Image: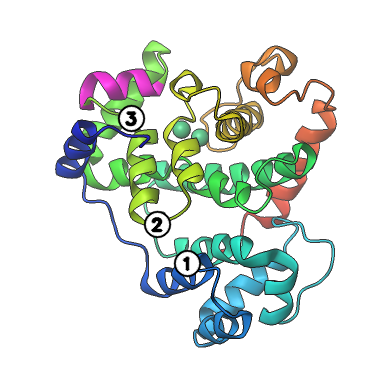
Amino acid sequence: MPICEELKTIIDTTCDLPPMPLVAGRIVSLASDPETDAKVLERAIQADQALTANVLKIANSSFYGCLRSINTVSSAIVLIGFKGIKSLAVAASLKSFYRRVDLTEKMLWEHSIGSAVAAHILSKKLYCYPEEAFIAGLMHDIGKVILNNQKNELFSKIMQVSYNDQVPLVEVEKEHLGFTHAEVGGLMIQKWNLSDDLVEAVTFHHNLEGIDPLKTDVFRFAALLDLTNKICAHLGIGYRNPAEGIDFQQLKSVKILKAGDLNFLKLIEEVQTGYEAEKGIF
Ligand SMILES: [Fe+2]
Ligand SMILES: [Fe+2]
């Protein structure tokens, strides 16, 4: 269990964690069941026109990065697999989740798109959760969206203090709320019945030490999200200003991922191009 019961209760009473949109929920439960027939899953997706359109749109975007073009739901299921379809259905349903009415939310949305692009590119290079990295990037800071919506004044203050005093956001969150956006996000993803590894990677994306290092896969998954964040910070995607002077080779996450051989200049360029091409996809 990544989040202890006591903390869960505190978060539950402070935030109203939204349920997964119905259509996505049905796809997720079908795709989670190994007994489900691909035809049944196909029909369930096709029953919703908007979902079908969005799933195909995302599957074909450079954002998702499939090599072949995918024209039908059945070929999407074959090429992307049940786990990938689950991610796409959730991603397609997130569109309605972000209201994007204020500047903070607009920046969070941009950050989530940039992170999804970066996480997906990295996951393929590092063979780390290729089917889930994209949704992990898209959702890793969903806790911030919830806090910004539901505790707007307090969360604005928290962000301001973090920015003015140059203190990591999670530290200010802990001080003012007793928990972090990462824990809120992890709990919501758990409520949405997505995979335990995704829950854990999101919960610990700012606290790699919190993960049992023997759980090597999850440890790498959380490290992937950390590196994703650093790339977005470097590019200034979802930040007021681009972060200067990040030494990628020296990052703990790069060491965990054994990613020291990556050409970071090229990688960052790839993320920037993918982000620019697809930021309007939703
Ligand atoms: Fe975060
Ligand atoms: Fe982030």
Q: Which residue appears at 65% of the width and 26% of the height?
A: 234
Q: Nearer the viewer, mark 2 or mark 3?
A: 2
Q: Which residue was labeled with disc 1? A: 28
Of the pair 29 and 177, the residue shown nearer to us: 29
Asked whether 82 falls inside the magenta stretch, the response is no
Display coloring = rainbow
Residue receiving disc 2:
193
Picture quadrant where residue 11 is located: top left
Question: In this picture, is 33 found above or below 129?
Answer: below
Instruction: Mark yes or no: residue 80 visible.
Output: yes
x, y (%) of residue 257?
70, 26
Disc sitting over residue 180 in the figure: 3
Q: Residue furthest left?
A: 13
Q: Which circle marks residue 147 in the picture? A: none
- Quadrant location, the N terminus: top left
First to last magenta residue range: 169-177
Marks 1/2: CA–CA distance:
8 Å
Q: Nearer the viewer, residue 235 or 168?
A: 168
Task: Check the image and report above or below for 228 versus 279.
Answer: above
Location of residue 131 in the rendering, given as x and y in whole percent from the top left corner:
65, 54
